[in-house]
Amino acid sequence: MPGKLVTHLPDDVDPIDAAALPLVSMTGDQLVRVATQAMAGQTILVSGALGSVGRAAVHSAMKLGATVIAGVRGRQIAEADSLGASATVAIDDEDALAALSQVDGVADTVGGDTAARLLRKVKAGGRFGYTSVLPEDAAKHALIEISRVFAQPDPAKLREFADDLRDGKFVLPINRRMPLSEARAAHELLENGGGGKVVLTI
């Protein structure tokens, strides 16, 4: 592996738990920093905010000084308070979304019908970044810049996330550690909504 893609793991960060960090942190960060180009004074909505990528997106947007709205399911509203976002919204509640003011950008980790509804909440000239599937009616929103994120390596930013993980500023729940021989069971756990990351150990 090229040295330019390697970063140092801070002391007191468990290397096994840290294995869950690179992809989700880089995807969430680039969803906010590159796709929505979030900055201080803007309002950014992050859908799936309690997921691993969503948590990273919320964290990066807050560090950039944006006003962050955490989009979660209605039953997750209380849990989402732990993210420290400026506000929360139930993205599975049509009335709650209807009452939501327009935002400067959406960092979408959910896709589907939810993404289509959120796209309509972006101001003209705003940005919509996504990681899943582009809404079918996206072409109707010609005044919104839409881009998909495929995470790129960023050792400096990864080290920043690792430092924040060590300092308790960023939380990435690890639901379970499982041996590689139980990979099938791990996939089934995730498919059933296991809550948090599953790390396979060798």
Image (cartoon, helix red, strand yellow):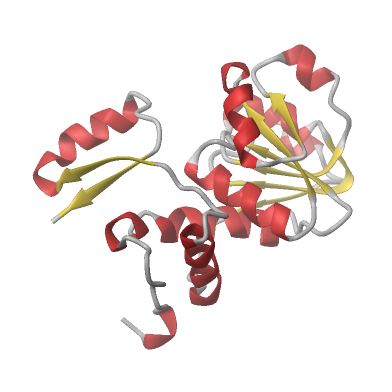
Left/right placement of residue 34 relative to residue 132 reads right
**Is 89 or 162 nearer to us in this picture?**
162
The image shows residue 54 at horizontal and vertical percentages of: 57, 43
The image shows residue 112 at horizontal and vertical percentages of: 58, 28
> For residue 93, which quarter of the picture?
top right
Residue at x 12% of width, y 39% of height: 182
| Viewer can see residue 136 | no
> For residue 18, which quarter of the picture?
bottom left
Residue at x 89% of width, y 54% of height: 41
* Residue 2 to residue 184: above or below: below
* Residue 72 to residue 38: above or below: above
The image shows residue 131 at horizontal and vertical percentages of: 55, 46
**Is 120 or 40 nearer to us in this picture?**
40
Residue at x 68% of width, y 62% of height: 34
* Residue 26 to residue 96: above or below: below
Q: Quadrant of the N terminus?
A: bottom left
| Viewer can see residue 14 | yes
Total marks in image: 0
The image shows residue 133 at horizontal and vertical percentages of: 56, 38
> For residue 32, which quarter of the picture?
bottom right
Task: Looking at this view, name the residue that lies furthest to the left.
Answer: 181
* Residue 160 to residue 6: above or below: above
Q: Quadrant of the C terminus?
A: bottom left
